[in-house]
Image (tube, rainbow, N blue to C red):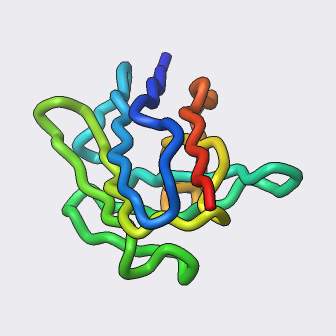
Amino acid sequence: QVQLAESGGGLVQAGGSLRLSCVVLGSIFRFENMGWYRQAPGKQRELVAAITSGGSANYADSVKGRFAISRDNAQSTVYLQMNSLKPEDTGVYYCNADSSTMGRLYPWGQGTQVTVSS
């Protein structure tokens, strides 16, 4: 059974940075396309960044140029470096398979809260 464990969130002022981590257990991680999802208060969960098994990245327009997704296959970990944070980046961040290319999702982890103050 695949387990996802996100960490690294916190409270930061606008313009600040955070680095999120997600350890993926129980899957053949190196073959998985992975994604970071965000659920803002009162909104649906959305995919904000994705990375293929080969390391190619794609981003939602709202985070392009500010966020960077990366992965360490040896550690079965995917990262999200978030810079120039804005209040609208506030939400709970989750990692999971990239549903747009993998056609599936694993059971969600607990997520990690990111709060950006103005």
State whether residue 39 is above or below residue 25.
below
Image x and y of residue 8, in percent = 40, 34
Please state the horizontal and vertical placement of residue 90, each as a whole percent of the image: 64, 53
User: Relative to the observer, which residue lies in front, 104 or 118?
Assistant: 118
* Residue located 34% across and 61% down the image: 51
- Left or right of 89, for residue 44: right
Relative side of 85 to 19, left or right: right
Q: Where is residue 86 in the image (x, y as percent from the top left)?
A: 56, 67
- Residue 85 at x, y = what percent? 48, 64
Residue 23 appears left or right of 41 = left
Q: How many labels does the image show?
A: 0
* Quadrant where the C terminus is found in the figure: bottom right
Q: Is residue 88 visible?
A: yes
Residue 52 vs 61, above or below: the answer is: above
Query: In the rendered view, would you say 72 is above or below 27?
Result: below
Q: Going 57% across and 26% down the picture, which residue do you hit?
A: 109
Q: Which of 15 and 62 is in front in this view?
A: 15
Considering every residue shown, the one lying at the far right of the view is 42
- Quadrant of residue 114 within the rendered picture: top right
Q: Residue at x 28, y 46 (%)?
A: 31
Give the residue at x 20% y 62%: 54
Residue closest to the eye, 105 or 51: 51
Q: Is residue 32 visible?
A: no
Q: Looking at this rendering, what residue extends furthest in the top direction?
A: 1
**View extreme (left): residue:** 74
Name the image quarter holding residue 52.
bottom left
Q: Which residue occupies the foreground of this view, 49 or 9?
A: 9
